[in-house]
Image (cartoon, grey):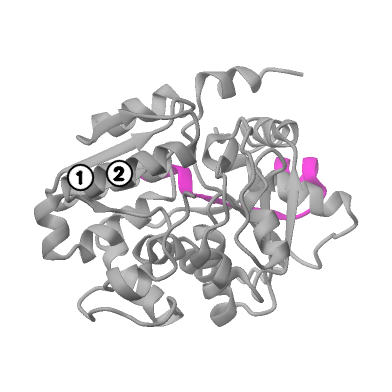
Amino acid sequence: MNHCDHNYWTDRCPVGDHGPVNTDPTFADVLRAAEAVRAELPATPLQAHPLLDGAVGAEVLVKHEHVLPTGSFKVRGGVHLASTLNAVERRRGLITCSTGNHAQSVAYAARLAGVDATVVMPASAPAVKRDAVAALGAHVVVSGTTLGEAAADARRRAGESGASFVCPTDPRIVLGHATAYLELFGQARETGADLALLVVPIGSGTGAAGACLVRDELSPGTRVVGVQSAAAPAGWRSWRSGEIVEAAATTRAAGLATTTGYPLPQRLLHGRLDDFVLVSDDDIDAAARLLAARAHTLAEGAGAASLAGLRAVLADGGAPSGPAAVVCTGANASADEIARLAAA
């Protein structure tokens, strides 16, 4: 299995200078994480695009996370991770597994902290993402055809080398990702936008978990809906069943290509996430075309999934009573994804 140990938060992960924490991440933890993230990264825009509103049939605000240094919101997790590394992690270095954006975030964290990093990526990871990880100074290992196989190899290598394995759902990563939603809800409040709906893409579920933590404190009236590719439904099945479930991932959207639910995000989503929808890869491609044509935004598959999810909610008769927010989580589109933008 490629999910993380259930006791990882309790046994391994400090938060800032506060030592080990024996409970799940809280909103207070998000606020502390935001201090570290703000010191390294600029806030990203939350913008309206009237042409997009017309095409979708609703008032839509887009959180443009793709403008961050690695082209993805996941760098937030890396920045927070770098600020919380303990002495063992600094001495032995880091190892992780990813299809791309988490890989870049850990490579960014390692460079920021001045430590070694190895990233194990499946052969299915786009070449542009492998190149980006290497450009940040991390050692890239291509292993297996799926994220699950890459994860197993990364854990084996960590055991042999003594490097610290960074789970994609390490609580420090979740807290870093949550800062995107701290910004989003704060920006919405500053502009007077009373958000009725927020749609968040789900691969491992770290972003959606962070969104729910922040929503509960800052905007409890906002519905949070998760969206995942129907060709990689492990997170959706786990949420619906209340158990960690594995499923094949054949999606074209590399950032959504997880093969299992993850315990920590699923635990945080349980009882908090209002709904969870599945969309097809063709729906995601169509949303990417809309973002390119109507919002001047290049989005990779996972980055367009939020808009695809909103369109699915609207098609199902779930029109929000006020503005809806979507998140362009990443712009690291592969050559194939860019080519599909021109497809009719």
Nearer the observer, 313 or 143: 143
Nearer the observer, 301 or 183: 301
Tell me the number on the disc at residue 156.
2
Residue 42 visible to an observer of this rendering: no
Q: Above or below — where is 110 with respect to 189?
A: above
Q: Give the secondary structure at mark 1.
A: helix
Residue 47 visible to an observer of this rendering: yes
Residue shown at the point (64%, 37%) measured from the top left: 291
Residue shown at the point (26%, 30%) measured from the top left: 134
- Residue type indicated by callout 2: Arg
- In the figure, is residue 321 to the left or right of 284? right
Give percent across and percent down for residue 149. 45, 37
The quarter holding residue 138 reads: top left
Q: Above or below — where is 99 with respect to 209?
A: above
Residue shown at the point (39%, 57%) measured from the top left: 43
Tell me the number on the disc at residue 160.
1
Q: Residues within 10 Å of mark 2 (few under 14, many from 20)?
A: few
Q: Above or below — where is 138 with respect to 264?
A: above
Magenta-highlighted residues: 51-68
Residue shown at the point (30%, 47%) measured from the top left: 106
Give percent across and percent down for residue 51. 72, 40
